[in-house]
Amino acid sequence: TSWSNKRTNTYNHFGHQLNMLYDDIESGKFGEDAKTGSWYLWVKSVKEANPKPENLETLQEELEALHRE
């Protein structure tokens, strides 16, 4: 599984994400303070746990594997 699939599987349902955003807005999380909100921190943790490869060859291999599926 690629980093993209891992991220997608970990992000959860859109309704869950929207609820977290709503709660952050209700708490007044705007501007730079939004980076302390639950939604931002959760998405950031998913991205950090499943980083996008920096190596172009790895990205190319993943794309080719997706096309074969």
Image (tube, grey):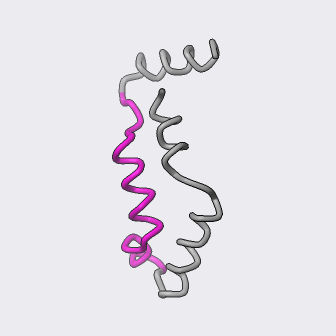
Q: Is residue 17 magenta?
A: no
The residue located at (48%, 87%) in the rendering is 27
How many numbered dots are placed on residues in this image? 0
Q: Position of residue 66 (x, y in %)?
A: 59, 20
Image vertical order of residue 52 relative to residue 36, above or below: above
Q: Magenta: predominant secondary structure element?
A: helix
Q: Nearer the viewer, residue 34 or 18?
A: 18
Quadrant of res 15: bottom right
Q: Position of residue 28 (x, y in %)?
A: 48, 87
Q: Position of residue 58 (x, y in %)?
A: 41, 20
Q: Position of residue 19 (x, y in %)?
A: 59, 72
Give the left or right position of residue 48, taking residue 13 as reference.
left
The residue located at (37%, 73%) in the rendering is 36
Q: Is residue 44 magenta?
A: yes
Image vertical order of residue 11 relative to residue 63, above or below: below
Q: Quadrant of the C terminus?
A: top right
Image vertical order of residue 58 relative to residue 23, above or below: above
Q: What range is drawn magenta here? A: 30-54
Image vertical order of residue 61 relative to residue 16, above or below: above
